[in-house]
Image (spheres, rainbow, N blue to C red):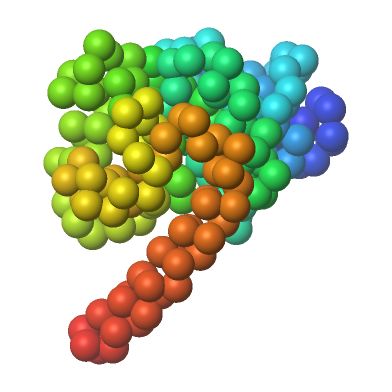
Amino acid sequence: MKVQCPKCLISFTIPDEKVPEGKTLRIACPKCRVPIEVSAGPLEVENHDVGGISDFPEMDGGSASIDVVEEGVKTALLCVSNKKLAEGLAPLLMGLDFWVVHAARAGFALGKLHHNTYDLIILEENFDAAKSADNLVLHHVQLLPMHVRRRFYLCLLSESMPTLDAMLAFRMGANMILNVRDLEKAKIIFARSMKEYKTFYGFFNAELNRKQA
């Protein structure tokens, strides 16, 4: 199915099987991020005037959880219940050329993770829970097979743990800890730490592929 964004007019294609008959698929324009609703049958798109980040009515999985993003675009999933905190982080990530999806609830975040792969996941320590022990998204990440877990970089937002504490990050199953008091330094920290991560696993994957050849 061919879709055209009503705002920037870019055209892109969605596999027909991704649009269930009789249902509406909510996607974000891969260029300008405007939400678009697509239905099976004659092309119908509806423009919702939303800026910045992809922020659809939250649904627990299903076709609405599928992101349509141009190849090569870096993607980030922002699992933050605090709206003010999310509004501060989203522009920062977009400044680092990330396409950002915001999840305010665990069910929506898990649906997104089931259907999509992200380069970066930023997760509140107590996301949609009273304490980290009840953080369903964190539990999900911790139980992933290692070959799946290596596909993304996980930053854990904390109000108590210190920024860049490598040992605590390891114990929590994260790549990095960022204390919310250090948000003004976040852009520099993300750029440096993710570059190091990409370089390390670039060598690791190259060596792994060499040995398997």
Residue at 55% in and 35% down: 183
Residue at 58% in and 44% down: 185
Using the image as rendered, state which of residue 42 and residue 154 is in the foreground.
154
Using the image as rendered, state which of residue 113 and residue 42 is in the foreground.
113
Residue at 67% in and 34% down: 91
Image quadrant for the N terminus?
top right
- The number of numbered discs placed on residues in the rendered structure image is 0
Residue at 34% in and 21% down: 127
Vertical placement of 1 versus 102: above or below?
Answer: below
Image quadrant for the C terminus?
bottom left
Q: In this view, does 2 lie to the left or right of 19?
A: right
The image position of residue 152, as x and y in percent, is 38, 51
Picture quadrant of residue 108: top left
Using the image as rendered, state which of residue 204 and residue 6 is in the foreground.
204
Picture quadrant of residue 59: top left
Q: In this view, does 24 lie to the left or right of 7?
A: left
Q: Is residue 173 visible?
A: no
The image position of residue 28, as x and y in percent, is 63, 30
Q: Is residue 129 visible?
A: yes
Q: Is residue 64 left or right of residue 185?
A: left
Vertical placement of 20 versus 66: above or below?
Answer: above
Q: In this view, does 167 lie to the left or right of 95?
A: left
The image position of residue 63, as x and y in percent, is 44, 25
The image position of residue 201, as x and y in percent, is 36, 70
Using the image as rendered, state which of residue 164 and residue 33 is in the foreground.
164
- Residue located farthest toward the right when viewing the structure as drawn: 8
Picture quadrant of residue 88: top right
